[in-house]
Image (cartoon, rainbow, N blue to C red):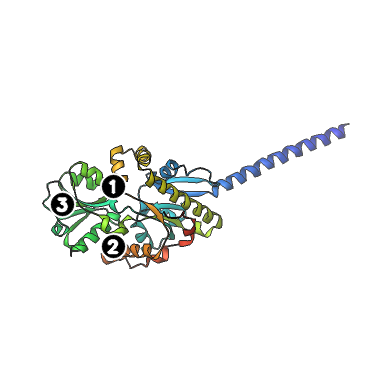
Amino acid sequence: MPSISRAAKRLEALSLLRGLLACTVLFLIQGVSAAQGLQVGDQSGLVQALLHAADEDRTADYSLTWHPFPAGPALLEAISAGAVDVGVVGNAPPVFAQAGGFAISIIGVADGAQNNNALLVPEDSGVRSVAELKGKRVAVAKGSSGHYLLLAALWQAGLSARDVDVVYVSPVDAQNAFASGHLDAWAVWYPFVGQAVARGARILLDGSAWPETGLNFTVASSQALADPQRAGQLADLLARLARAQAWATAHPVEWAQALAATTRLPLSLVQEMVSHQSLRYVPISPAVITLQQRLADAFAEAHLIPRTVQVEAIFDPRFNGALPPLH
């Protein structure tokens, strides 16, 4: 009988060990599964809010881990380093990232936000045309979509950046300087445009003449694109972003409410901002690449990047087929 008891104890111990091993393996599998989701960089929580408002953040068989970033350049640096898999940025940061040798690719394009940028002058300004800005102090965030609008507007008026006193300053700092009368003009984007206009500023021009100012890009890391599993997840995420943006454009009231809740900006200001946009995801095409090349050439000519770049090299059209049909 003692031998039977010892055998029973051994069986009991083995059974317990197997159970512990099974739990450990299950835990590891779950950990690996979670780790194999996408790491998503987001500015001000806008992409996360968009997916949630459109109900596109559910039913995915992979996880999305969100990482906040204050601006596009920092987000692209993290993507290049492999700390983040994907993120959405404006038109200018990819040019500077490519010039800096970042390991990134543009996998998605949304257009229709060109009215988001504007060149402002104070309410009591006598300036009525861009040509009259010659010798004036103009504020802009260096390397931003507003910066390109300024360069394009000056070129159209027969001027260059050397003909004005360009002051490189963040939108927050420029807002105070502009309001206190220390600037003659300010190239910026919404919501800063709406806030300044509400205080009396006048829009000298917006980006409607330059469709390249209205491009937004979904950018992925080379590491994520080289991983078949994550590449498949990126295709699915891009499709979700496209559907969510289509929903937001078709439902501006609901989207403005969700966006106001996320940004904590006044609803009236967000409604105005949304009304100036008609964003939609479009396939990567020669036309899109040509528009972005204009941007890169302008920054190179102004010596804002160290070399001329061919932007086609960082466009990856493999996910065009994941987009819903355009209507």
Q: Could you give the CA–CA distance between mark 1 and mark 3, rounded to whole angstroms?
A: 19 Å
Residue 61 appears left or right of 137: right
Q: Where does the image place residue 205, in percent across and percent down from the top left?
A: 21, 54
**Of circles 1 and 3, which is in front?**
1
User: Foreground residue, 212 or 77?
Assistant: 212
Q: Considering only order in the chain, which callout, 3 or 1, is on the residue closer to the N terminus?
A: 3
Q: How many marks?
A: 3
Which secondary structure lies at badge 1? loop
Which secondary structure lies at badge 2? loop
**Of circles 2 and 3, which is in front?**
3
Q: Considering only order in the chain, which callout, 1 or 2, is on the residue closer to the N terminus?
A: 1
* Residue 196 in view of the camera: yes
Which secondary structure lies at badge 3? loop
Residue type at the position of mark 3: Asp
The numbered mark at residue 190 is: 1
Give the residue pinned by disc 2: 304
Q: Considering only order in the chain, which callout, 3 or 2, is on the residue closer to the N terminus?
A: 3
Q: Quadrant of the C terminus?
A: bottom left
Q: Where does the image place residue 240, in percent across and percent down from the top left?
A: 47, 49
Q: Where does the image place residue 72, in percent across and percent down from the top left?
A: 36, 52
Residue type at the position of mark 1: Tyr
